[in-house]
């Protein structure tokens, strides 16, 4: 998954589901995923921001996946380790895995941003306004 992609909200939701396994513990609802997508709308390939009348739906799916895995990690903090019928269930490893995945998508996103440091394509409007220290 590279730079932000132009796609419908339904397509972005389907892709995000593929990237973050929302049906595995800890689970994420469609509403949670849609809320994440609502916050990762990006500048389209023509440089139009989301408030422009001709903006084409564009989403930063690496950022969306990062946020989804962070949300899963947050939910995983409530899980506890336990033993049952002679087997040990290490719920802490779920939390660590979620953080590892969040960091992987953050790394992918930064690699794309660093490809051309002068480019603002795919950045969110507040990131453009506030400069590189915000991303």
Image (tube, rainbow, N blue to C red):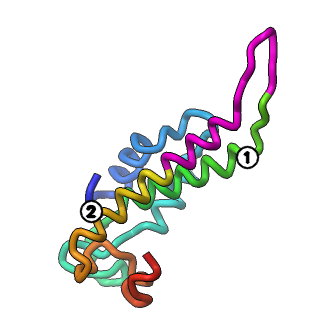
Give the label on residue 39, or none. none
Mark 2 is surrounded, within 10 Å at the Cα level, by few (under 14), some (14 to 19) or many (20 or more) other residues, namely many
Q: Quadrant of residue 58?
A: bottom left
Residue drawn at x 44%, y 89% as measured from the top left: 130
Q: Residue furthest left?
A: 46
> Distance from label 2 to label 1 (Cα)?
31 Å
Image-based side of 124 in relation to 35, left or right: left
Considering the image in quadrants, where does the C terminus appear?
bottom left
**Residue stretch in magenta:** 82-101
Q: Nearer the viewer, residue 25 or 135?
A: 135
Give x and y (percent) for residue 63.
43, 61
Which residue is the site of mark 2? 3
Q: Quadrant of residue 8?
A: bottom left
Q: Secondary structure at mark 1?
A: loop
Mark 1 is surrounded, within 10 Å at the Cα level, by few (under 14), some (14 to 19) or many (20 or more) other residues, namely some
Residue 94 inside the magenta-drawn segment: yes
Image-based side of 83 in relation to 89, left or right: right
Give x and y (percent) for residue 35.
54, 61
Residue 91 inside the magenta-drawn segment: yes
Q: Quadrant of residue 61?
A: bottom left
Q: Secondary structure at mark 2?
A: loop
Image-based side of 50 in relation to 37, left or right: left
Which residue is the site of mark 1? 77
Among numbered discs 2 and 1, the one appearing first in the sequence: 2
Residue drawn at x 47%, y 65% as measured from the top left: 38
**Can you say whether 23 is above or below 58 in the image?**
above
């Amino acid at each position: 998954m590279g730079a932000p992609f132009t796609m419908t909200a339904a397509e972005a939701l389907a892709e995000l589901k593929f990237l973050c396994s929302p049906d595995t513990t800890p689970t994420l609802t469609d509403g949670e995923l849609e809320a994440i997508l609502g916050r990762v709308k990006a500048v389209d390939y023509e440089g139009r921001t989301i408030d422009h009348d001709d903006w084409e739906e564009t989403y930063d799916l690496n950022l969306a996946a990062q946020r989804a895995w962070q949300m899963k990690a947050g939910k995983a903090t409530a899980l506890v380790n336990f033993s049952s019928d002679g087997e040990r269930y290490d719920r802490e490893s779920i939390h660590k895995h979620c953080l590892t995945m969040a960091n992987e998508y953050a790394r992918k996103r930064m690699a794309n941003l660093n490809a051309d440091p002068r480019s603002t394509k795919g950045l969110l409007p507040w990131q453009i306004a506030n400069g590189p220290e915000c991303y």
